[in-house]
Image: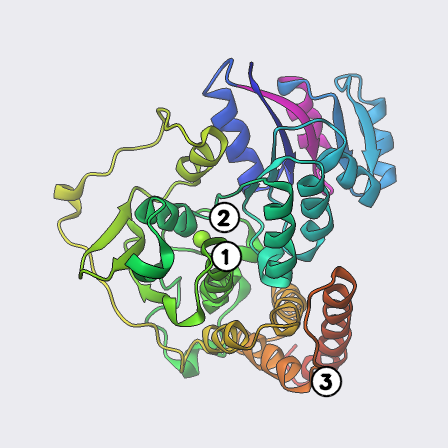
Protein backbone atom coordinates (compact mmCIF):
# COMPACT_ATOMS: atom_id res chain seq x y z
CA UNK A 1 0.00 0.00 0.00
CA UNK A 2 1.44 3.40 -0.92
CA UNK A 3 1.84 5.85 1.97
CA UNK A 4 -0.72 8.65 1.83
CA UNK A 5 0.95 12.07 1.87
CA UNK A 6 -0.50 15.54 2.53
CA UNK A 7 1.69 18.62 2.09
CA UNK A 8 1.18 21.92 3.89
CA UNK A 9 3.08 24.42 1.73
CA UNK A 10 3.29 22.45 -1.51
CA UNK A 11 4.42 25.30 -3.78
CA UNK A 12 7.34 26.41 -1.57
CA UNK A 13 10.88 25.10 -1.85
CA UNK A 14 10.33 22.12 0.53
CA UNK A 15 6.93 21.34 -1.00
CA UNK A 16 8.33 21.22 -4.53
CA UNK A 17 11.30 19.09 -3.45
CA UNK A 18 8.90 16.73 -1.64
CA UNK A 19 6.90 16.27 -4.83
CA UNK A 20 10.12 15.57 -6.76
CA UNK A 21 11.02 12.84 -4.25
CA UNK A 22 7.50 11.41 -4.59
CA UNK A 23 7.72 11.47 -8.41
CA UNK A 24 11.12 9.72 -8.22
CA UNK A 25 9.58 6.84 -6.21
CA UNK A 26 6.64 5.60 -8.26
CA UNK A 27 4.20 3.35 -6.41
CA UNK A 28 5.60 4.22 -2.97
CA UNK A 29 3.42 7.25 -2.21
CA UNK A 30 -0.03 8.63 -2.92
CA UNK A 31 -0.54 12.41 -2.69
CA UNK A 32 -3.94 12.93 -1.02
CA UNK A 33 -3.96 16.67 -0.26
CA UNK A 34 -1.98 19.81 -1.05
CA UNK A 35 -2.15 23.26 0.55
CA UNK A 36 -0.44 26.33 -0.90
CA UNK A 37 -0.41 30.05 -0.15
CA UNK A 38 -1.10 32.36 -3.08
CA UNK A 39 0.43 30.47 -6.03
CA UNK A 40 -2.77 28.82 -7.26
CA UNK A 41 -1.43 28.32 -10.80
CA UNK A 42 1.50 26.20 -9.62
CA UNK A 43 -0.90 24.33 -7.32
CA UNK A 44 -3.15 23.61 -10.31
CA UNK A 45 -0.13 22.14 -12.13
CA UNK A 46 0.73 19.97 -9.10
CA UNK A 47 -2.90 18.81 -8.90
CA UNK A 48 -2.74 17.81 -12.60
CA UNK A 49 0.40 15.78 -12.00
CA UNK A 50 -0.38 14.15 -8.65
CA UNK A 51 -4.23 13.99 -8.57
CA UNK A 52 -4.86 14.78 -4.87
CA UNK A 53 -8.45 14.58 -3.59
CA UNK A 54 -8.21 17.92 -1.85
CA UNK A 55 -6.35 21.19 -2.48
CA UNK A 56 -6.40 24.46 -0.61
CA UNK A 57 -5.13 28.03 -1.10
CA UNK A 58 -5.03 30.95 1.31
CA UNK A 59 -7.39 33.29 -0.54
CA UNK A 60 -11.02 32.38 -1.46
CA UNK A 61 -10.68 34.35 -4.74
CA UNK A 62 -7.77 32.10 -5.79
CA UNK A 63 -9.84 29.09 -4.72
CA UNK A 64 -12.42 30.28 -7.27
CA UNK A 65 -9.72 30.44 -9.99
CA UNK A 66 -8.64 26.90 -9.08
CA UNK A 67 -12.21 25.56 -9.30
CA UNK A 68 -12.63 27.19 -12.71
CA UNK A 69 -9.36 25.81 -14.04
CA UNK A 70 -10.56 22.61 -15.63
CA UNK A 71 -7.26 20.90 -14.85
CA UNK A 72 -8.15 20.54 -11.18
CA UNK A 73 -10.50 17.69 -10.33
CA UNK A 74 -9.87 17.97 -6.60
CA UNK A 75 -12.13 19.43 -3.95
CA UNK A 76 -10.97 23.04 -3.41
CA UNK A 77 -10.95 24.82 -0.05
CA UNK A 78 -9.34 28.01 1.24
CA UNK A 79 -8.04 29.80 4.34
CA UNK A 80 -7.50 28.32 7.79
CA UNK A 81 -10.34 25.87 7.26
CA UNK A 82 -8.61 24.53 4.15
CA UNK A 83 -5.26 24.15 5.94
CA UNK A 84 -6.90 22.22 8.79
CA UNK A 85 -8.74 19.95 6.36
CA UNK A 86 -5.55 19.19 4.38
CA UNK A 87 -3.74 18.48 7.67
CA UNK A 88 -6.36 16.42 9.43
CA UNK A 89 -9.25 15.57 7.10
CA UNK A 90 -7.63 13.87 4.12
CA UNK A 91 -6.61 10.62 5.81
CA UNK A 92 -2.88 11.19 5.32
CA UNK A 93 -0.38 8.78 6.89
CA UNK A 94 2.29 11.51 6.77
CA UNK A 95 1.70 15.26 6.82
CA UNK A 96 4.62 17.29 5.49
CA UNK A 97 4.58 20.46 7.58
CA UNK A 98 6.31 22.97 5.30
CA UNK A 99 4.48 26.25 5.78
CA UNK A 100 6.61 29.23 6.72
CA UNK A 101 6.45 30.67 10.23
CA UNK A 102 3.70 30.62 12.82
CA UNK A 103 0.79 29.81 10.51
CA UNK A 104 1.93 26.18 10.49
CA UNK A 105 1.33 25.63 14.22
CA UNK A 106 -2.45 25.04 14.30
CA UNK A 107 -2.57 22.71 11.25
CA UNK A 108 0.46 20.73 12.50
CA UNK A 109 -1.26 20.22 15.88
CA UNK A 110 -4.42 19.17 14.02
CA UNK A 111 -2.44 16.61 11.98
CA UNK A 112 -0.99 15.18 15.22
CA UNK A 113 -4.49 14.90 16.74
CA UNK A 114 -5.59 13.08 13.57
CA UNK A 115 -2.80 10.55 14.17
CA UNK A 116 -0.62 11.38 11.15
CA UNK A 117 3.18 11.19 11.31
CA UNK A 118 4.69 14.64 10.94
CA UNK A 119 7.53 15.29 8.50
CA UNK A 120 8.62 18.63 9.91
CA UNK A 121 10.28 21.38 7.89
CA UNK A 122 8.42 24.25 9.59
CA UNK A 123 10.83 24.66 12.54
CA UNK A 124 8.89 27.65 13.91
CA UNK A 125 6.23 25.15 15.09
CA UNK A 126 8.67 23.68 17.64
CA UNK A 127 10.23 27.05 18.44
CA UNK A 128 6.86 28.54 19.37
CA UNK A 129 5.29 25.59 21.14
CA UNK A 130 7.87 22.82 21.51
CA UNK A 131 6.52 21.51 24.77
CA UNK A 132 2.92 21.45 23.62
CA UNK A 133 3.67 19.88 20.23
CA UNK A 134 6.02 17.16 21.53
CA UNK A 135 3.61 16.32 24.39
CA UNK A 136 0.67 15.92 22.01
CA UNK A 137 2.77 13.85 19.60
CA UNK A 138 3.82 11.53 22.45
CA UNK A 139 0.22 11.23 23.66
CA UNK A 140 -0.98 10.34 20.15
CA UNK A 141 2.10 8.13 19.57
CA UNK A 142 2.97 9.89 16.30
CA UNK A 143 6.60 10.46 15.32
CA UNK A 144 7.94 13.90 14.41
CA UNK A 145 10.42 13.20 11.61
CA UNK A 146 12.79 16.09 10.92
CA UNK A 147 13.16 17.37 7.36
CA UNK A 148 15.49 20.14 8.52
CA UNK A 149 18.81 18.77 7.24
CA UNK A 150 20.78 19.32 10.46
CA UNK A 151 18.16 17.53 12.54
CA UNK A 152 17.91 14.68 10.06
CA UNK A 153 21.70 14.50 10.53
CA UNK A 154 21.44 14.47 14.34
CA UNK A 155 18.82 11.78 14.20
CA UNK A 156 21.15 9.56 12.14
CA UNK A 157 24.20 10.32 14.27
CA UNK A 158 22.33 9.50 17.50
CA UNK A 159 20.76 6.39 15.97
CA UNK A 160 18.58 5.93 19.04
CA UNK A 161 21.48 5.90 21.61
CA UNK A 162 20.32 6.64 25.17
CA UNK A 163 20.39 10.43 25.64
CA UNK A 164 21.09 10.61 29.36
CA UNK A 165 23.98 8.15 29.64
CA UNK A 166 25.86 8.18 26.35
CA UNK A 167 25.33 11.50 24.57
CA UNK A 168 27.35 14.52 25.69
CA UNK A 169 26.04 17.00 23.14
CA UNK A 170 24.99 17.51 19.56
CA UNK A 171 26.42 20.11 17.19
CA UNK A 172 24.49 21.71 14.34
CA UNK A 173 26.60 23.20 11.58
CA UNK A 174 25.86 26.52 9.85
CA UNK A 175 27.33 27.62 6.53
CA UNK A 176 27.65 31.12 7.99
CA UNK A 177 25.56 32.47 5.13
CA UNK A 178 26.57 35.18 2.64
CA UNK A 179 27.93 37.50 5.37
CA UNK A 180 30.21 35.09 7.23
CA UNK A 181 33.23 37.37 6.72
CA UNK A 182 31.41 40.72 6.39
CA UNK A 183 32.43 43.36 8.93
CA UNK A 184 29.92 44.69 11.47
CA UNK A 185 30.00 48.14 9.80
CA UNK A 186 29.29 46.71 6.34
CA UNK A 187 26.46 44.51 7.69
CA UNK A 188 24.43 47.67 8.38
CA UNK A 189 24.26 48.47 4.67
CA UNK A 190 23.61 45.05 3.09
CA UNK A 191 20.58 44.76 0.79
CA UNK A 192 17.84 42.08 0.67
CA UNK A 193 19.25 40.90 -2.70
CA UNK A 194 22.68 40.33 -1.12
CA UNK A 195 21.14 38.56 1.88
CA UNK A 196 19.15 36.28 -0.43
CA UNK A 197 22.32 35.07 -2.16
CA UNK A 198 23.02 31.99 -0.02
CA UNK A 199 26.38 30.37 -0.81
CA UNK A 200 25.43 26.68 -0.47
CA UNK A 201 21.67 26.07 -0.06
CA UNK A 202 18.69 26.92 -2.29
CA UNK A 203 15.77 27.78 0.01
CA UNK A 204 12.73 30.07 0.39
CA UNK A 205 13.25 33.78 1.24
CA UNK A 206 12.39 33.67 4.98
CA UNK A 207 14.81 30.87 5.85
CA UNK A 208 17.49 32.40 3.59
CA UNK A 209 17.35 35.72 5.48
CA UNK A 210 17.33 33.78 8.77
CA UNK A 211 20.46 31.96 7.54
CA UNK A 212 22.17 35.26 6.76
CA UNK A 213 21.44 36.57 10.28
CA UNK A 214 22.17 33.18 11.91
CA UNK A 215 18.67 33.32 13.41
CA UNK A 216 18.02 30.13 11.47
CA UNK A 217 20.68 28.33 13.52
CA UNK A 218 19.23 29.80 16.71
CA UNK A 219 15.76 28.52 15.80
CA UNK A 220 17.34 25.14 14.99
CA UNK A 221 18.96 24.93 18.45
CA UNK A 222 15.50 25.28 19.99
CA UNK A 223 14.07 22.81 17.48
CA UNK A 224 16.84 20.30 18.38
CA UNK A 225 16.20 20.64 22.12
CA UNK A 226 12.57 19.55 21.60
CA UNK A 227 13.13 16.93 18.92
CA UNK A 228 15.85 15.11 20.84
CA UNK A 229 14.89 15.98 24.43
CA UNK A 230 18.20 17.69 25.22
CA UNK A 231 19.17 20.38 27.73
CA UNK A 232 20.26 23.84 26.46
CA UNK A 233 23.89 22.96 27.32
CA UNK A 234 23.74 19.91 25.07
CA UNK A 235 23.03 21.78 21.82
CA UNK A 236 25.82 23.62 20.05
CA UNK A 237 26.65 25.39 16.78
CA UNK A 238 29.74 25.28 14.60
CA UNK A 239 30.31 27.32 11.42
CA UNK A 240 31.15 25.04 8.50
CA UNK A 241 31.19 26.97 5.20
CA UNK A 242 31.21 23.90 2.91
CA UNK A 243 27.79 22.64 4.19
CA UNK A 244 28.89 19.01 3.88
CA UNK A 245 28.77 17.96 7.54
CA UNK A 246 25.22 18.79 8.63
CA UNK A 247 25.40 17.70 12.26
CA UNK A 248 27.55 15.85 14.78
CA UNK A 249 26.88 13.92 17.95
CA UNK A 250 29.53 13.76 20.68
CA UNK A 251 29.47 10.79 23.05
CA UNK A 252 30.83 10.29 26.56
CA UNK A 253 33.68 8.07 25.29
CA UNK A 254 35.13 10.90 23.17
CA UNK A 255 33.70 9.65 19.88
CA UNK A 256 32.01 12.01 17.48
CA UNK A 257 29.72 10.88 14.69
CA UNK A 258 29.10 13.25 11.80
CA UNK A 259 26.45 13.04 9.11
CA UNK A 260 27.62 14.19 5.67
CA UNK A 261 26.03 14.67 2.27
CA UNK A 262 25.80 17.20 -0.53
CA UNK A 263 23.52 20.08 0.52
CA UNK A 264 20.26 18.91 -1.07
CA UNK A 265 16.96 18.86 0.82
CA UNK A 266 15.72 15.83 -1.10
CA UNK A 267 17.92 13.58 1.08
CA UNK A 268 16.29 14.49 4.39
CA UNK A 269 12.84 14.65 2.75
CA UNK A 270 13.29 11.14 1.39
CA UNK A 271 14.46 9.91 4.80
CA UNK A 272 11.42 11.41 6.55
CA UNK A 273 8.95 10.06 3.98
CA UNK A 274 10.48 6.57 3.84
CA UNK A 275 11.38 6.25 7.55
CA UNK A 276 12.68 3.83 8.81
CA UNK A 277 13.89 2.71 5.36
CA UNK A 278 16.60 4.29 3.23
CA UNK A 279 15.85 4.41 -0.50
CA UNK A 280 17.94 5.61 -3.46
CA UNK A 281 17.83 9.39 -3.88
CA UNK A 282 18.63 11.11 -7.16
CA UNK A 283 21.11 13.65 -5.85
CA UNK A 284 24.78 14.22 -6.74
CA UNK A 285 27.18 11.96 -4.81
CA UNK A 286 29.53 13.49 -2.26
CA UNK A 287 33.11 13.52 -3.62
CA UNK A 288 35.36 14.05 -0.60
CA UNK A 289 38.61 13.71 -2.57
CA UNK A 290 37.54 16.51 -4.87
CA UNK A 291 36.52 18.68 -1.90
CA UNK A 292 39.91 18.04 -0.32
CA UNK A 293 39.25 19.78 3.00
CA UNK A 294 36.45 20.66 5.36
CA UNK A 295 36.73 23.66 7.69
CA UNK A 296 35.09 24.64 10.96
CA UNK A 297 35.06 27.77 13.13
CA UNK A 298 33.22 29.24 16.13
CA UNK A 299 30.20 31.45 15.36
CA UNK A 300 30.63 35.17 16.06
CA UNK A 301 27.70 36.23 18.25
CA UNK A 302 29.07 39.79 18.28
CA UNK A 303 28.22 40.28 14.61
CA UNK A 304 25.31 37.86 14.63
CA UNK A 305 23.31 38.84 17.71
CA UNK A 306 20.27 36.78 16.62
CA UNK A 307 22.13 33.62 17.63
CA UNK A 308 22.70 35.05 21.12
CA UNK A 309 19.04 36.04 21.41
CA UNK A 310 17.99 32.52 20.46
CA UNK A 311 20.39 31.00 23.00
CA UNK A 312 18.95 33.15 25.77
CA UNK A 313 15.33 32.11 25.02
CA UNK A 314 16.43 28.50 24.73
CA UNK A 315 17.59 28.68 28.36
CA UNK A 316 14.60 30.69 29.50
CA UNK A 317 11.77 28.73 27.84
CA UNK A 318 8.12 29.66 28.47
CA UNK A 319 6.72 32.13 25.96
CA UNK A 320 10.13 33.72 25.24
CA UNK A 321 10.80 31.59 22.11
CA UNK A 322 7.36 32.48 20.68
CA UNK A 323 8.16 36.18 21.22
CA UNK A 324 11.57 35.79 19.54
CA UNK A 325 10.00 33.99 16.60
CA UNK A 326 7.16 36.47 16.01
CA UNK A 327 9.40 39.54 16.33
CA UNK A 328 11.83 37.94 13.88
CA UNK A 329 9.07 37.15 11.37
CA UNK A 330 7.88 40.78 11.41
CA UNK A 331 11.45 42.13 11.19
CA UNK A 332 12.45 39.81 8.32
CA UNK A 333 9.37 40.80 6.33
CA UNK A 334 10.19 44.48 6.89
CA UNK A 335 13.80 43.90 5.78
CA UNK A 336 12.68 42.02 2.65
CA UNK A 337 10.30 44.91 1.91
CA UNK A 338 13.22 47.35 2.07
CA UNK A 339 11.80 49.15 5.13
CA UNK A 340 14.60 48.46 7.62
CA UNK A 341 18.30 47.67 7.57
CA UNK A 342 19.72 44.18 8.16
CA UNK A 343 21.05 45.01 11.63
CA UNK A 344 17.60 46.24 12.68
CA UNK A 345 16.51 42.58 12.68
CA UNK A 346 18.50 41.62 15.83
CA UNK A 347 17.75 45.03 17.36
CA UNK A 348 13.97 44.61 16.97
CA UNK A 349 14.09 41.03 18.27
CA UNK A 350 16.16 42.16 21.26
CA UNK A 351 13.70 44.97 22.03
CA UNK A 352 10.74 42.58 21.94
CA UNK A 353 12.52 40.16 24.29
CA UNK A 354 13.33 42.96 26.70
CA UNK A 355 9.79 44.32 26.81
CA UNK A 356 7.91 41.02 26.78
CA UNK A 357 5.39 39.80 29.33
CA UNK A 358 6.09 36.48 31.08
CA UNK A 359 4.26 33.19 30.76
CA UNK A 360 4.78 29.43 30.87
CA UNK A 361 3.69 28.81 27.26
CA UNK A 362 1.99 25.52 28.06
CA UNK A 363 -1.30 26.31 26.33
CA UNK A 364 -1.93 27.15 22.67
CA UNK A 365 -3.85 30.26 23.75
CA UNK A 366 -0.88 31.57 25.73
CA UNK A 367 1.56 30.88 22.89
CA UNK A 368 -0.68 32.59 20.35
CA UNK A 369 -1.15 35.51 22.78
CA UNK A 370 2.64 35.92 23.03
CA UNK A 371 2.89 35.71 19.24
CA UNK A 372 0.27 38.46 18.84
CA UNK A 373 1.90 40.65 21.48
CA UNK A 374 5.31 40.40 19.80
CA UNK A 375 3.88 41.16 16.35
CA UNK A 376 2.10 44.28 17.61
CA UNK A 377 5.09 45.41 19.65
CA UNK A 378 7.53 44.93 16.75
CA UNK A 379 5.18 46.56 14.23
CA UNK A 380 4.90 49.64 16.45
CA UNK A 381 8.71 49.79 16.84
CA UNK A 382 9.05 49.41 13.07
CA UNK A 383 7.32 52.71 12.50
CA UNK A 384 10.02 54.40 14.54
CA UNK A 385 12.88 52.58 12.77
CA UNK A 386 11.38 53.01 9.29
CA UNK A 387 11.54 56.80 9.44
CA UNK A 388 15.27 56.65 10.22
CA UNK A 389 16.22 54.47 7.22
CA UNK A 390 17.42 56.26 4.11
CA UNK A 391 14.80 56.22 1.30
MG1 LIG B 1 18.46 23.61 8.53
| In this rendering, position of residue 233 left or right of residue 306 | left
Of marks 3 and 2, the one in the foreground:
2
Label 2 element class = loop
- What residue does disc 1 label? 208
First along the sequence among labels 1 and 3:
1
Would the CB of label 2 be found within 8 Å of ligand 1? no
Q: Which mark is residue 335?
A: none
* Few, some or many residues within 10 Å of mark 2 (<14, 14–19, 20+): some
Query: Left or right: 69 with respect to 335?
Result: right
Residue located beneath label 3 in the image: 384
Label 1 close to label 3 by CB (< 8 Å): no
Q: Determine whether, in the image, residue 207 is placed left or right of residue 157.
A: right
Q: Say what secondary structure mark 3 lies in.
A: helix
Residue 175 seen in this snapshot:
no
The residue that disc 2 covers is: 203
**Image coordinates for residue 143, horizontal then vertical, percent:** 54, 41
Which corner quadrant of the image does residue 174 belong to?
bottom left
Amino acid sequence: MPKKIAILGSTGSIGENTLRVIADNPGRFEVVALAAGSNWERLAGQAREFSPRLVSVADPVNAGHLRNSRSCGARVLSGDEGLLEVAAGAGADIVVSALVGSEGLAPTLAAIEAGASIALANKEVLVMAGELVTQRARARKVPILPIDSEHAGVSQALAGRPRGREVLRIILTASGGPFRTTSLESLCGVTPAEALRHPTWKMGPKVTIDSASLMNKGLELIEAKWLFDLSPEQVDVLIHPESVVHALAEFVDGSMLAQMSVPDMRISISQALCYPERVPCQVPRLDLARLGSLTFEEPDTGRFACLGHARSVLVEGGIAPAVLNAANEVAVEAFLGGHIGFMEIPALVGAALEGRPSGSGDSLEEVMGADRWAREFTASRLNGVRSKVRP
